[in-house]
Image (cartoon, grey):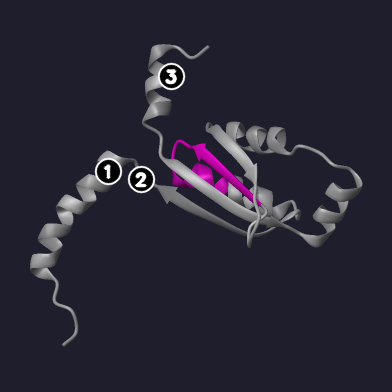
Amino acid sequence: MLDSTDKKRRENMPHYMYQASYSPEAVKTLVNNPQDRTGAAKAAIEANGGSMIGAWMAFGSDDLLVIADMPDDASMAAVAFAVSAAGAIVNGKTTKLLDMPTAVEGMTKAKAVLDAYRPPS
């Protein structure tokens, strides 16, 4: 169980969305030996001080989607690099997610940028 300090620290961690596809070899392995890879993803995330929110398989251009809280960008990059280096994942992409208060802060700051920025004319 998380103590209140650890819980607050995790609540303030940046959130990330990781999307990727399995290599053809990995897909063949998964078809021949169906398995839930959530535990492996969770272990990689937790090895870098993070917490996995969830993992899903998907239709479309990406085979999987993972949402995680990580201590910082370098920790998330380490997970992405390690998973890609293992060879089962291709076309991985990481998106840093903004919570709504941060997005509203960005919208508010955009007003000042609009005053300073001039589009091409």
**Which residue is farthest front?**
59
Residue 41 image point, x, y percent: 66, 38
**Magenta-tinted stretch:** 64-78
For the image, the number of numbered tags is: 3
Which residue carries the number 2 mark?
A: 98
Specify whether residue 93 is in view: yes
Specify whether residue 48 is in view: no
How far is mark 3 from mark 2, CA to CA? 21 Å
Picture quarter with the C terminus: bottom left
| Circles 1 and 2: CB atoms closer than 8 Å | yes
Helix, strand, or loop for circle 2? loop
Residue 2 image point, x, y percent: 48, 14
Closest to the observer, 99 or 43: 99
Closest to the observer, 102 or 46: 102
Which residue carries the number 3 mark?
A: 6
Please tell me whether residue 66 belongs to the stretch shown in magenta.
yes
The residue drawn where x is 76% and y is 59% is: 23
Residue type for callout 3: Asp
The residue drawn where x is 51% and y is 42% is: 75
Residue 98 image point, x, y percent: 35, 45
Helix, strand, or loop for circle 3? helix
Helix, strand, or loop for circle 1? helix
Which residue carries the number 1 mark?
A: 102
Residue type for callout 2: Leu
Q: In this view, does 116 lie to the left or right of 16?
A: left
Q: In this view, does 102 lie to the left or right of 32?
A: left
Q: In this view, does 16 lie to the left or right of 28?
A: left
Q: Of circles 3 and 2, which is in front?
A: 2
Q: Earlier in the sequence, mark 3 or mark 2?
A: 3
